[in-house]
């Protein structure tokens, strides 16, 4: 996804805040979980329709 420079800065700031709050291990594990989602799975998750089963990474 391409972000405008201003949006990119905010995105990076939020990512760093999440990384600091969760710790590197948890953040990395959850980041990879999210990356493994299909568009359909991500949309279902965002809408609260996703199962609790994590995708295989």
Image: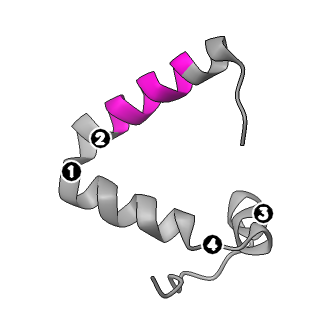
Q: Which residues are magenta?
A: 9-18
Q: Secondary structure at mark 1?
A: helix
Residue on which the image places disc 3: 43
| x and y, in percent, of residue 56 in the image | 49, 88
Q: Residue at x 43, y 66 (%)?
A: 32
Q: Residues within 10 Å of mark 4 (few under 14, many from 20)?
A: some
Which one is in front in this view, the residue at disc 4 or the one at disc 3?
A: 4
Find out whether residue 29 is within the magenta segment. no
The tag on residue 14 is none
| x and y, in percent, of residue 46 in the image | 71, 57
Label 2 – label 3 distance at C-alpha: 23 Å
Q: Residues within 10 Å of mark 1 (few under 14, many from 20)?
A: few
Residue on which the image places disc 1: 24
Which mark is first along the chain, 2 or 4? 2
Label 3 – label 1 distance at C-alpha: 26 Å
Q: Residues within 10 Å of mark 2 (few under 14, many from 20)?
A: some
Residue on which the image places disc 4: 37
């Amino acid at each position: 996804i391409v972000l405008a420079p201003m949006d990119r800065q905010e995105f990076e700031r939020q990512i760093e805040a999440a990384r600091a709050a969760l710790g590197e291990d948890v953040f990395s594990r959850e980041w990879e979980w999210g990356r493994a989602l299909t568009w359909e799975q991500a949309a279902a998750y965002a809408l609260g329709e996703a199962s609790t089963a994590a995708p295989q990474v």
